[in-house]
Amino acid sequence: MKKFWMISMLLIAALFVISCGEGEEEGGEGAACTTPGAFRCSGDYSQTCDQEAWKNFEQCTADKPCNTTSGKCEAKSSDNTDPTTNPTTDPTTEPTTEPTTEPTTDPTNSGDSDCGKMFDCFQGCNQDQTCMQGCYTNSTDKGRADYDALYDCMNNNGCLDSSLSNEEYGQCVVNNCYNEADACDLLSGGGGEAADNSYNSPYGSLTIQFSSDTIRNSSDGQDDTTTGMSLAAFANGTYGNGSASVTPAGAAGIQSEVDYYVDAQYGNSIEITQIPVFQSGQNYTGGNPVVIFSIDEENAAVGALNTSVMQGAQALLYVVDINWNAAQPSITCFHAFGEGTVNITALGDYANHGNIALNGNVTLYSPKNYMTYGDISGAFQNPITVCSPVQ
């Protein structure tokens, strides 16, 4: 399988530029306009739209500059900030790290117990019942006994109901058959550890809704600041042990952007990034948490995508914190990964700024307490840092 879970996090200036209205159209006095009575800034002048042409209304000064929001000359004050001001931090630089988030082994693989080795054997059978019976028969007495105990527990508690989703199945096993599953090494995540119960499982949930007429290309120039960008959240919901929102109440706004990344090393992908933007004086800076949804190009098509951190999934959603003060912003820690289904309802020629629309729902899990697999934070090709529990 191609290395899919490579977090590129190619953060660009477009994520922080607040889009402007008619007040910044090109052309000086006499240029055509369509909204009578509208104002805009043009150099040192405030202009107004009169008889379908821009006309100088007032010459602004250093003490009374043109406010690009209102289009009028206004005195500066602590309450009169210009929302078009660029942030003090420069997000045009890319992160220095691209943490790999693909488990080194399939987390369904187990450890060194006899029952665990039986499950490893099952994995190679591809659902062939004769093969699986051979794995059971060739195991030890203890291996078979531990397997029988797990099967009976799951059967008696309804965990084998075929109508259960992956999340419901996992919670059923954890809630009712934890000890039996642990005896078969099914909670260690294939090289992981026992679950850290200071992180709730699940760790939140998100509703996904996004559409854009254009997809930004990683080769676009940095002066292209609005392609693929929306001043709205694509993911809404909570994360953590309580009800912390992925769209913080104190944020001045939320920006989402969809990008097509060409990466010769890790493969091409479409990524949607959501960043809360905070105001500091007259400047705007990136905040946390950041939500990222990534689709490997080989899975980029209209239809339902299985979203998970597990190998074989078609898409990946993760919630992280970013260090925006660094010279090159980078991920500092991971809060959660998403499990669920996201439906792509429209997808144009994404390599040439085509459109995209999608929706869905995901359940969040901390890497420290991931479904039935426990602590999987050590089961990645490159180590990841897990954020402290969010209360």
Image: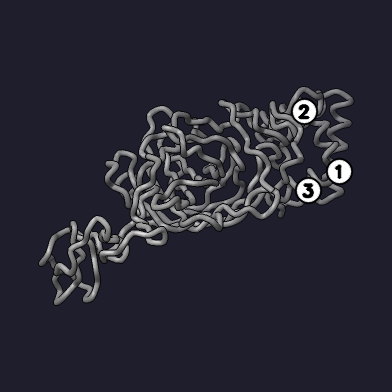
Residue 345 appears in the picture as rendered: no
Q: Secondary structure at mark 2?
A: helix
Give x and y (percent) for residue 134. Answer: 77, 27
- Under mark 3, the amino acid is Cys
- Under mark 2, the amino acid is Gly
Q: Earlier in the sequence, mark 2 or mark 1?
A: 2
Q: Earlier in the sequence, mark 1 or mark 3?
A: 1
What residue sits right under mark 1 in the picture?
153
Which residue is at a point 20% across and 70% down the rendered structure image? Answer: 48
Give x and y (percent) for residue 370. Answer: 69, 40
What residue sits right under mark 3 in the picture?
172
Quarter-of-image position of residue 355: bottom left
Q: Residues within 10 Å of mark 2 (few under 14, many from 20)?
A: many
Which residue is at a point 69% across and 52% down the rendered structure image? Answer: 242
Q: Nearer the viewer, residue 112 or 204?
A: 204
Q: Earlier in the sequence, mark 2 or mark 3?
A: 2
Q: Which label belongs to residue 116? A: 2
Give x and y (percent) for residue 323. Answer: 50, 37
